Amino acid sequence: MDDQANTLIRHRKICFRGPHENTSQAQTATLILSDIEGILKVTSEGDDIIHISYDIQLISLRIIDELLVEIGLHLDNNLFCKLKRALYYYSEDAQRETLGYSDTTQRVFIKRYQKLPHGCRDGRPDCWRRYL
């Protein structure tokens, strides 16, 4: 059981790149990410690198990166970082899908809702819908 728990913990390095008005993006990211559920440890190394440990059952690197970009931080987007990030996204998404932690149940309910007949999907023209 302990070995399985260790395989679900990920340790990653996230690099930031300027130019940015915030000269210490790593410190800002550390403060923001330290309070998020699923993130076990965040430490900054200088002004542009953070080391993060998180539980893949609760959060993924894709979600973390999207959060950092949404708040306005600039991730390092050189070719090597993009390739690593894409590989991490793919492997984590595949593992989350295998373990059943993805949003597949939400997608199932969305598809079912789209197939149900309701007013939004009425094929009649607007004038015929209001005709009494």
Image (cartoon, rainbow, N blue to C red):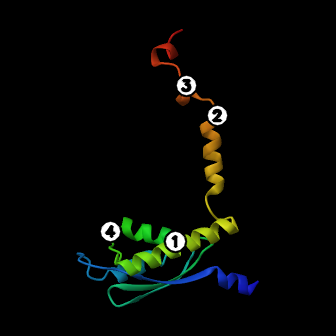
- Whichever of labels 1 and 2 marks the residue nearer the N terminus, that label is 1
Q: Marks 3 and 2: in contact by CB < 8 Å?
A: no
Mark 4 or 1: the one toward you? 1
Q: Marks 1 and 4: in contact by CB < 8 Å?
A: no
In the displayed structure image, the side of residue 16 where residue 19 appears, left or right:
left
- The quarter of the displayed image where residue 75 is located: bottom left
Task: Say which amino acid is labelled 3.
Answer: Asp
Task: Say which amino acid is labelled 2.
Answer: Leu
- Whichever of labels 4 and 2 marks the residue nearer the N terminus, that label is 4
- Whichever of labels 4 and 3 marks the residue nearer the N terminus, that label is 4
Mark 1 or 2: the one toward you? 1
Task: Say which amino acid is labelled 1.
Answer: Tyr
Residue named by callout 2: 116
Residue named by callout 3: 122
- Whichever of labels 2 and 3 marks the residue nearer the N terminus, that label is 2
The alpha-carbon separation of the residues under discs 4 and 2 comes to 40 Å
Q: Nearer the viewer, residue 114 or 52?
A: 114
Q: Marks 3 and 4: in contact by CB < 8 Å?
A: no
Residue named by callout 1: 89
Please tell me how crowded label 3 is: few (under 14), some (14-19), or many (20+) other residues with Cα within 10 Å. Answer: few
- Whichever of labels 1 and 3 marks the residue nearer the N terminus, that label is 1
The image quadrant where one finds the N terminus is bottom right
Task: Say which amino acid is labelled 4.
Answer: Gly
Residue named by callout 4: 72
Residue shown at 61%/51% (left/top)?
107
